[in-house]
Image (cartoon, grey):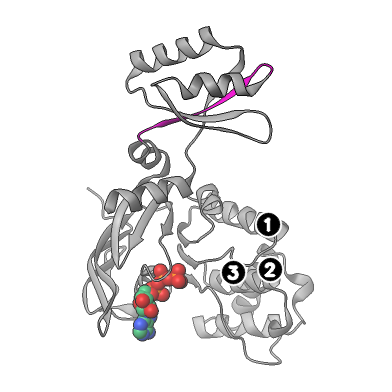
Amino acid sequence: MSEPFLKVTNLVRHFGAVKAVDGISFELKPGQSVGLIGANGAGKTTTMRLLTTLDLPDSGEIIFKGMDATTWPEKVRSHIGWMPDSFDPPAHTTVYDFIDFFARAYGLTGDDRVIEVEKVIKFCGIAELRDRHVKRLSKGQTQRVSLARMLIGNPDFLVMDEPAAGLDPQARLEFKQLVRELQKQGKTLLISSHILSELSEMCDTMIFMDSGHIIRTGNKNELADETNHNRPYSIRPVGDPNELLAWLAGSRDWVGATLQQDGSIHVDCLATGDAETAEALRALCNGNAVLEVSRRSVNLEQTFVNILQEKK
Ligand code: ATP
């Protein structure tokens, strides 16, 4: 069997009594886009700093494309791009000089360096910002520069800490388009975010962290099904919704009915198994005037809440 792209085993990083990362293990496949989810202080940034060789673990192993990242940090570093949640650029440095500095640090010289800097500037759509001071840019512009900086050297593993935080809707949309382009290029992505709807659009696989531990990993849809024991539905009634609400309140198969602003009713079906669910739906449609009944997908926020509740 081929080596995983990244294999993390029993990784530990404590700061005094704070167990920031407390024995986590996981694997990534090449080309995967993985979301790292957890409450404040769960250990996400510490994990990312360890993976990007910016910090050393107390114990445990990080094997990146067959190389031990702790023993050979300088070897793996050139394959890894890091986008921190914030950075403090030096005063009076232009966008071009800032990116050029990282190209020099990467070891590029002459025409190769110019070509590389121009390439990432073009990809990130920041040509018109090249002579502006990085410190004076808006949040959205700063994030694009940070993305450009990360892409110097064409790394194949991109680690991004809260990349969409503080961006307006248009900037978030543009950022997601850039991420999609990177996915098409086959990059492997690890992205942390508190905006779970956003993360859900960018990543299929999720790693949930809590208090330095990984409490769940998996495909977001499978996790939603596994952790959401009730089946959420949306029902569009004909006429007065209160009649249907009263019927649902009296039924053993349906719970938590709430009227939505658009006139539909959101409700959970307690029936398990196909036959029972079919029976609950038949009773609903026979006893009431309904225009439409559809399964609602469980969003990532609800999955996160369910996983935290399971843990208690
Ligand atoms: P957030 O979502 O708020 O960014 P996080 O999941 O990224 O949180 P970390 O930044 O990894 O969490 O922090 C995990 C824990 O480790 C926190 O309790 C934090 O205070 C602590 N910690 C992180 N870095 C250090 C450090 N250099 N020195 C001491 N404690 C630290």
235 falls in the magenta region: yes
Q: Which residue is mark 2?
A: 140
Which mark is in front, 3 or 1?
A: 1
Which secondary structure, mark 3?
helix
Residue 190 at x, y percent in the picture: 44, 60
Q: Amino acid at mark 1?
A: Glu
| Mark nearer the N terminus (2 vs 3) | 2
Instruction: Give the farthest residue toward the right.
Output: 128
Q: Residue at x 46, y 58 (%)?
A: 189
Badge 2 density bin: few <14, some 14–19, many ≥20, Cα 10 Å = many
Of residue 311 and residue 54, the one placed in the foreground of this image is: 311
Of residue 136 and residue 113, the one placed in the foreground of this image is: 136
- In the picture, the quarter occupied by the C terminus is bottom left
Residue 193 at x, y percent in the picture: 50, 61
Q: Is residue 20 visible?
A: yes
Q: Is mark 2 within 8 Å of ligand 1?
A: no
Report the Cα–Cα distance between label 1 and label 2: 9 Å
Q: Is residue 74 visible?
A: no
State how many labels appear: 3
Q: Residue at x 50, y 30 (%)?
A: 267
Which secondary structure, mark 1?
helix
Residue 17 at x, y percent in the picture: 25, 82
**First to last magenta residue range:** 229-239
Q: Residue at x 31, y 63 (%)?
A: 65
Q: Amino acid at mark 2?
A: Gly
- Residue 93 left/right relative to 64: right
Q: Amino acid at mark 3?
A: Leu
The disc label shown at residue 174, or none: 1
Residue 172, located in which quarter of the rendered image? bottom right
Q: Which residue is mark 3?
A: 147
